[in-house]
Image: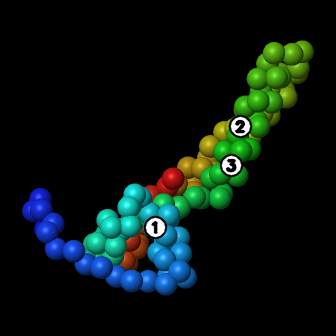
Amino acid sequence: MGTSKRTKQVKVFVNEAEHKTILDELSHTTEKRISGFARKKLLGKTIVFKYRNKSIDDLLTELVQLRNDLKMAMSGEHDHDEIARKIDQINSGIGKIADICLQKSMLEKASKNPCITMKEK
């Protein structure tokens, strides 16, 4: 289509349930407006979907807690072995995130559907 001005209008009437379904699906994409989402959907163009990776969210929560523990350990009278254990836990968490990212990358490359692209929030 390029940069040509859109001069034709297409109207579609939907019921409440259909409208809710459309809005729900739209909320999981990077599209801001229904018109752009509908245009891409009708023309079979790529729609970028957002998703959250619970494993990474859980690991990040754990790493934040470890960081806070480490700050507390460094500011107080704590044993160096405890600090070393916390650093090892952080390194382990970072390794887990790297593994998950590598798996995600491999899955995206193996995807058979060229019309759907995933993007993290």
Q: Nearer the viewer, residue 68 or 36?
A: 36
Query: How far from the left and from the top, in percent, is residue 81?
Result: 84, 27
**Few, some or many C-alpha atoms within 10 Å of disc 2 (few <14, some 14-19, many ≥20)?**
few
Residue 73 visible: yes
Q: Which residue is mark 2?
A: 64
Q: Quadrant of residue 79?
A: top right
Instruction: Label 3, secondary structure: give it.
Output: helix
Quadrant placement of the N terminus: bottom left
Residue 110: percent from the left, percent from the top? 40, 72
- According to the image, label 3 marks what residue? 59
Amino acid type indicated by mark 1: Leu
Secondary element under disc 2, as helix, strand or loop, is: helix
Q: CA distance from mark 1 to mark 2?
A: 32 Å
* Residue with the mark numbered 1: 26
User: Who's the residue at 50% across and 64% down the image?
Assistant: 27
Please determine whether, in this image, residue 83 is positioned above or below residue 30: above
For badge 2, the amino acid type reads: Val
Q: Residue at x 59, y 58 (%)?
A: 53
Q: Residues within 10 Å of mark 1 (few under 14, many from 20)?
A: some
Q: Earlier in the sequence, mark 1 or mark 2?
A: 1
